[in-house]
């Protein structure tokens, strides 16, 4: 059973002399943001839901299909660099004068080519409200898609759309 903690992986010999990598403890993994086609290595912070067994949530066991909370910072910094737009800012926290002054200073530093590129990327840009709220808190819900006890890795995908809505409803119960 794989738990959250400092990385500890054992090599296991299997039939035919092949090897499995049994992860006993993991603290990070590669998670992909499907709609933005972006994958980043992020820290796994907590296990919050498991459809098969609540005991696995209580003991913070990482298994395939578990819903975990991951650090949002790598995705947030990528988004800000890619689109040139800050996301996950809590509404009403920053005064208007400071917010208006900061973007002007940054735009002066960027070349016209970079500004054209950011404007072209920004045309089709949309972000889900639920994802924006999660970015503001610094944590994202994700689903583990790999089998940590077999592959020694904890990879997954950020929850979005109806799947995110379903799991948020399950977590409120």
Image (tube, grey):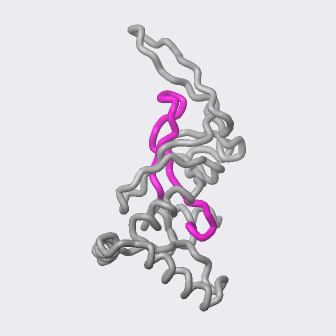
Q: In the displayed structure, does residue 66 sit left or right of residue 160?
A: right
Q: Can you give x and y, in whole percent of width and height, for residue 104 in the image? A: 49, 83
Q: Is residue 118 magenta?
A: no
Q: In the displayed structure, does residue 137 sit left or right of residue 65?
A: right
The image quadrant that residue 109 belongs to is: bottom left
Q: Can you give x and y, in whole percent of width and height, for residue 157 in the image? A: 45, 52
Residue placed at 41% from the left, 13% from the top?
18
Residue nearest the observer in this picture, 135 or 23: 135
Residue placed at 56% from the left, 51% from the top?
67
Residue placed at 38% from the left, 8% from the top?
16
**In the rendered view, would you say 135 is above or below 59?**
below
The quarter of the image holding the N terminus is top right
Residue nearest the observer in this picture, 111 or 159: 111
Q: Can you give x and y, in whole percent of width and height, for residue 144 in the image? A: 50, 45
Residue nearest the observer in this picture, 28 or 66: 28
**In the rendered view, would you say 128 is above or below 12?**
below
Q: How many marks?
A: 0
Give the farthest residue toward the top. 17
Magenta stretch in the rendered image: 134-158
Q: Is residue 140 magenta?
A: yes
The image quadrant that residue 8 belongs to is: top right
The quarter of the image holding the C terminus is bottom right
Give the farthest residue toward the bottom. 97
């Amino acid at each position: 059973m794989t738990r959250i903690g400092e990385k500890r992986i054992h090599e296991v010999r299997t039939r035919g002399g092949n090897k499995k990598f049994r992860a006993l403890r993991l603290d990070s993994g590669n998670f992909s943001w499907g709609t933005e086609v972006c994958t980043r290595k992020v820290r796994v912070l907590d296990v919050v839901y498991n459809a098969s067994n609540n005991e696995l949530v209580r003991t913070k066991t990482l298994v395939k299909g578990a819903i975990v909370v991951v650090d949002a910072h790598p995705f947030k910094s990528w988004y800000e660099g890619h689109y040139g737009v800050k996301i996950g800012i809590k509404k009403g926290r920053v005064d208007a004068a400071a917010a208006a002054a900061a973007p002007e200073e940054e735009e002066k530093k960027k070349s016209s080519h970079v500004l054209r590129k950011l404007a072209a990327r920004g045309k089709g840009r949309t972000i889900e409200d639920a994802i924006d709220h999660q970015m503001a808190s610094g944590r994202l819900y994700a689903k583990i898609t790999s089998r940590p006890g077999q592959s020694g890795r904890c990879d997954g995908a950020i929850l979005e759309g109806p799947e995110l809505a379903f799991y948020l409803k399950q977590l409120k119960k």
